[in-house]
Each structure stands twice: as C-alpha cells, then as structure tokens.
Amino acid sequence: LTEKLQNIFRQLRSKGRLTEEDVKEALKEIKRALLAADVNFKVVKEFIGNVQQRAVGQDVMNGLNPGQMVVKIVNEELTSLMGSETTEIALQPGKAMTVIMMAGLQGAGKTTTTAKLAGKFKQKGKKPLLVACDVYRPAAISQLKINGEKQQVEVFSMEDSRKPAEIAREAVAYAEKNGHNLVILDTAGRLHIDEEMMEELQQIKKAVTVHQTILVIDAMTGQDAVNAAKEFHEKAGIDGVIITKLDGDTRGGAALSVKAVTGKPIFYVGMGEKLSDLEQFYPERMASRILGMGDVLSLIEKAEAQIDEDKAKEMSRKLKKAQFDFEDYLESVKQMKNMGGIGNIMNMLPMGGLGKMKGLSEDQTSQAERSMARMEAMIYSMTVQERRDPDLLNPSRKHRIAKGAGVDISEVNRMIKQFGEMKKMMKMMGKGGRRGGFRLPF
Ligand code: GDP
Ligand code: MG
C-alpha cells in the first residue's frame, strides 16, 4: 500500500498546480490502492468522500502547495479513521480487580499477547494472574505457562476437563484470595467463527465480571480479520482490539478498517514474536507509516524548524545588496547541512521554487556536494577578515589558502571569481524584485 500511495503522491507533486480534476484522479488511485490493500469497501468509500470534500472545499491552507495539501488531508483522514487518539486499556481504579478476557480466532496471537500484556501491566505495578481457558489443546496450556514463566507472572490452569466459564470463576476467586489485581483470561479460538466459540465467551461473561474484552486479530489476514472483528463485536461485545503480526503486514488494511467497522479502538499492536514486541498504538504514526510519507512530513517539519527566519531575512537582504560574503556562504551551507544536504532538500521541496534543480541525478548531487566541500575547505583556510572582504586576497594570501585547503592556486582563483559572479547575479535578481528567502549557496 505504501508503495502505491507514494507513486500517487509523486505524481501529484510533479504538478505545478492541482485542479479539481487532478484531485479526483488522485483519489481514484488512492481508492484503488486502499481496496487492493484489503481495506473494507465501505470504509474506503467514506474515506474518499471525506478527503474529497476537504480537498476541493474551502479547506486550503497557506504555506502548503496543493500536493502537500492533499498529502496532509489524506494523512489526517487516515489518522481519524484509526481513532485519532491513543487509547489505554481501562483498568479498575486503585487496587480493585480488573478482569480482561482475550478473544480471537485460533492463531491470532491471543496466548502470546496475553503474556505480552502481563509484562506491560506488571511494569505498571499490577499483579497479574494469567488464566488458561483454552481447554481444547493441552499444548495451549503449557504455552501459556512457559510464557508466564518468562514474564515471571503466575499462570492459573485446571487440568481436569472443566468448562472455560468454570475455570474463569475459579481463577477470579483464586486471584482475589492471593492478592492479584488483574486477571487475564486466555480463551480458546477456532479456525472460523462459530456459535460454540461465541457461546463460550458469553458463558465466561456470565460467570465472572469481565471489565474489558479485548479482541486479538492477525494483521496479515487483512479483510478476514476485519470481518471477524465485526462478528466478535456483534456477538460477544468487545471493548478494543490488539492487532498482531504488524511486523509482517505490508498492507495495513486491517489496522485501517477495524475502528471504522467496530467503532472500537486499537489498544496495542504486536510487532514480533518476542514478549517485548508489543507497542502502544498511535493512529498518527500508523497513518504516516501507511502513507510512507513519514520521511517527507518530518523533513518539512525539520526545514521549518531549522531555517531561522531572521537569519534567512538578513541573508536575503544581503543578497539583494550583494553584500553576501564568504561568512554568509558558510552560514547557508550550515543551514543546508542541517536539513540533510542537497539531495534531501530537493526531495523535501517537491514543488518548490527549485523546479530546475529537480532533474539533478544522484551523480550530479554528489558532484555538487563535493565541489561545495572543496569550496568550504578553501573558505576555512581564510582568515575572518578575508572572508568578509575578498578584495584583501592578494597572490600571497591566495597561495596560503591553496596550501591550507590542499588545492591548486588556480582553483582558489576560480572560486573567488565564481563567487564574485554569483554576487553579481544575485544583485540582479534582487533588483528584479524577487522575494527573498532562503537560498541555496550555489
Ligand atoms: P493464539 O492461537 O491466538 O493463542 O495464537 P498464539 O499466541 O499461539 O500465536 C500464534 C503464532 O503467532 C505464534 O507462533 C506466535 O509466536 C505468533 N505471533 C503472535 N503475535 C505475533 C506478532 O506480533 N508478530 C509475529 N511475527 N508473530 C506473532
Ligand atoms: Mg492460544
């Protein structure tokens, strides 16, 4: 999904200005990409509707070009689709007992996640008891025991064949007697949703007070996971979702649809098989990850943060008056490096005033960076007075600089000449009334 979306945005960015037609066309592509990523059809339809309304409507912001605008809107809508805010699993206040029931299809990751959660809550000062309610597979009980041991959390099980609801009741009584304040019931899944499984969950809920029913779904099963979520919610009632195996999911379809379909938040995401691989769910980060725009967005932020407005203004004033000296040059090189070099700036300003530069190949970029580095070396070999006033540079001073920078004197001469020409050019541009701002130092 990420790759497809990136292509769409690349196309958008290559435009100078977006028409309503462009937005429509792009949204059609986004729609296709979302459907291909196994996002629920209804969710996609509503999502596209929302983005379109905002993109075409009055909601246009200063300072962004249309491509960035669409990216921003898509990003925000994706975020709100997934619930906007981080939601914690609600525990009973103080020392009161909380009972959590884990539900989900077989293989979704319930047992693993039960142990992962136990670790998290233990860190927060809870005293959990894990309960093996999967009575169908003896292996399931020992799996929970092994995981519980790893987390140094007690596991409750009953060897004789009891009903899950009965085990749950015994377990809660045991927990209360033994100073536990959190019970996590690991229930049995089935390969498919069936009445028996739902019945079992309902029985458990009748037998004990379940404060939170958490559905565990496998991200890699995409739309199936979302359909399962819908049914679990309708038949057993869930309070939230944990999505596992997100480490192996490249499409992101399940994460995108589940909130929209069930109305319930995603609490955590499983990012691996290790018991520490459980992460809080951040809708915004997930949206950025799905968009694959994380880098671009953070670069835009970076640029905003790094370019000191005042410095830029001062610089542009100097440029117009052609007072730009070697010290200023070093300053602008520094700003540029802060933003990650020429290559990054080109990517960062997809439709900015650098249209001409967009054609720079990687080769050309590194060449430009190399020649800038040489120039820098020469400037660093100058005294501050020389940097401020290049007219001071007589032949003997030039020799000293060439030696210091390890270059030929002809290169020093060429550089000084080029710098003079650049100044002249900038003076002309300044007179031409172009708005000043940050400029690239070459
Ligand atoms: P259950 O049948 O629902 O109890 O599922 P299990 O907890 O037994 O997990 C099934 C398989 O998925 C096991 O091999 C787990 O190691 C694996 N698994 C669970 N969560 C994750 C996860 O977040 N990432 C990865 N890569 N594997 C996971
Ligand atoms: Mg299990």
Image (spheres, rainbow, N blue to C red):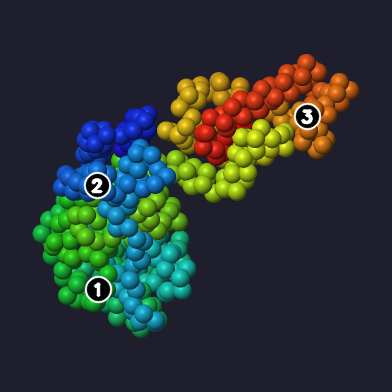
Instruction: Please indicate, yes or no, whether residue 106 appears anywhere in the rendered image.
Output: no
Kind of residue sitting beneath label 1? Val
Q: Position of residue 133 (x, y in %)?
A: 26, 65
- The quadrant holding residue 85 is bottom left
Which residue is the site of mark 1? 210
Name the one closer to the observer, 123 or 417: 417
Q: How far apart in space, not on screen, are marks 2 and 3 (Cα)?
A: 54 Å
* Structural crowding at the residue carrying mark 2, measured as other residues with C-alpha within 10 Å and reported as few (<14), some (14–19) or many (≥20): few
**Residue assigned mark 2:** 57
Which residue shows up at 17% across the image and 75% down it? 206
Q: Nearer the viewer, residue 343 or 392?
A: 392
| Mark 3 burial class by Cα count in 10 Å: few <14, some 14-19, many 20+ | some
Report if the CB atoms under discs 1 and 2 are less than 8 Å apart. no
Residue 390 tag number: 3
Q: CA distance from mark 1 to mark 2?
A: 46 Å
Q: Which mark is residue 440?
A: none
Q: Is residue 440 above or below residue 87?
A: above
Residue 106 percent location from the top left of the image: 24, 53
What is the secondary structure assignment of the residue under circle 2? loop
Question: CB atoms at circles 2 and 3 under 8 Å apart?
Answer: no
Q: Residue furthest top?
A: 410
**Circle nearer the viewer, 3 or 1:** 3
Q: Is residue 117 visible?
A: yes
User: Which class describes the residues within 10 Å of circle 1: few (<14), some (14-19), or many (20+)?
Assistant: some
The disc labelled 3 sits on which kind of residue? Pro
